[in-house]
Amino acid sequence: MSDVLARLRALQQGDLPTHGGSTLAYVYDSGLAEADEIGRQALALYGATNGLDPTVFPSMRTLENELVGWAARLLQRDDAVGTVTSGGTESILLAVQTARDASPGVAQPSMVLPSTAHAAFHKAAHYFGVRAIVVDVDPATYEARPEAMAAACDDSTVLMVASAPSYAHGVVDPVPAIAEVASARGIRCHVDACIGGWLLPYLRADGVEVAPFDFAVPGVTSISVDLHKYAYTPKGASILLHRTPELRRAQYFAHADWPGYTMLNSTTQSTKSGAPLAAAWAVIQHIGDDGYQRLARTSYDATLRLAEAAESVDGFTLLARPATTLIALRSDERADVFTIADELGARGWFVQPQLSFRDQPASLHLSMSAATAPRLDDLITAVRQSVAAAQTAGPVQIAPELAEAAQAIDPALLDDAAFDGLLELAGLGTAETLPDRMAPVNALLDIAPPRLREALLTAYLDRLMRPTS
């Protein structure tokens, strides 16, 4: 057994750190060692349980109902109902599926969403045949435009979407105006609060002015809120809440017309481990309301301080004032954000590059956690040093022939040979030996049209995920 665990620990040495506050995307760290330990113990206790049938494991039913009750209270509707899911994407998928299935008379359903809505809504569109009608946001504020969304609605619209906040820019959409349009037209309104749902209520309780976004807003019919983000629970745990039981009914899937047990599911999964549910319950009980209020304020204050410091760096621009704990930054022409990201990585900080979108330039995304706050001075120093180093190096230059090739490739024809040829032309070796510094790769992706970006990354992922002996 020791050899097996030693192998796991050795493999983990190549991973980004999940604790310590230096990974500013993908993971969220409270900095509370005791909460982490309680979560790990709960994971082990419930690792063999199965949430397929809540009558077989009634303890899981109790844990889920208590978690949903906590979230409903935070989001200002005690009698809301909900379901614990595996993550924000599953919560969003279920919100879209439920809106579709609640409107069986609509032959070709659609949903109206701002261009900043999470990509999971497009995944839902792909999976469930709900056409996504995308409306541009305000170019100055990055907020959704309710009047433009209203104009995009028609008889096929079954759902309108708002974010609290949007992932890419960290701004809260004008939920009341969007929900008012939806309510007047008998359309469901989903608020994606996967980031803000466990954070904004505690900031509000601490005196921070928070834009209306939850069930206190008339017309909001469902909300997604992730627990493994700012509730700081182990992955993966999220909650999809509906304002009433009637609104949730279409979420369920049941099938009795086969010789086995009658299948009845509340999520996209049938069999699902109770471990993330139990771990989420345990961590939330341990931290409690007072603890979350402190953690929320710590993260938020650190975010504002980092945003102010970053704006003081020559050549760096803050895209929007943070509404929660997300920061988006862009650089001027003296450097590119991809090189800045590499420089930060070399200094021990992982940040997430965001490629250009339409007329919006590439940017850097940072998700602040409470564990980062004690190290904020070090992060600010690293940001200043990294921007200076990137300006000295200058932006990544894409050879004209490579840019021409990237524009000419048909994504539908990108097979293994074409993928390898593009890597060779770019001087990036093979998919298995990509360079440690990712700026050249990201710069190449940045000039590629969106469909080609998707094809290139799909080809890369396919190459990575091949069996080994």
Image: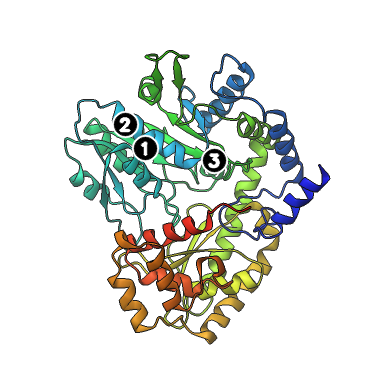
Quadrant where the N terminus sits is top right
Q: Is residue 228 left or right of residue 222?
A: right
Judged from this view, the residue extending furthest toward the right is: 2
Of residues 189 and 3, the one drawn nearer to the viewer in this rendering: 3
- Residue under pointer 2: 99
Q: Secondary structure at mark 2?
A: helix
Give the CA distance from mark 1 to mark 3. Answer: 16 Å
From this view, report whether residue 124 is shown above or below residue 19.
Answer: above
Mark 3 closeness class: few <14, some 14–19, many ≥20 residues within 10 Å: many
Say whether marks 1 and 2 touch (CB < 8 Å): yes
**Badge 2 amino acid:** Ala
- State the colouring used for the structure image: rainbow
- Residue under pointer 3: 198
Give the CA distance from mark 2 to mark 3. Answer: 24 Å
Measured as percent of width and height from the top left, residue 230 is found at 58, 45
Measured as percent of width and height from the top left, residue 87 is found at 51, 40
- Residue under pointer 1: 190
- Where, by quadrant of the figure, is residue 285 drawn? top right
Residue at 36%, 58% (x, y): give it: 142
Residue 75 visible, this angle: no
Residue at 41%, 50% (x, y): give it: 172
Q: Secondary structure at mark 3?
A: loop
- Where, by quadrant of the figure, is residue 371 drawn? bottom right
Give the CA distance from mark 1 to mark 2. Answer: 9 Å
Residue 154 visible, this angle: yes
Q: Which mark is residue 168?
A: none
Q: Nearer the viewer, mark 2 or mark 3?
A: 2
Q: How many marks?
A: 3
Q: Which circle's residue, 1 or 2, is located before the other in the chain?
A: 2
**Badge 3 amino acid:** Trp
**Badge 1 amino acid:** His
Mark 1 closeness class: few <14, some 14–19, many ≥20 residues within 10 Å: many
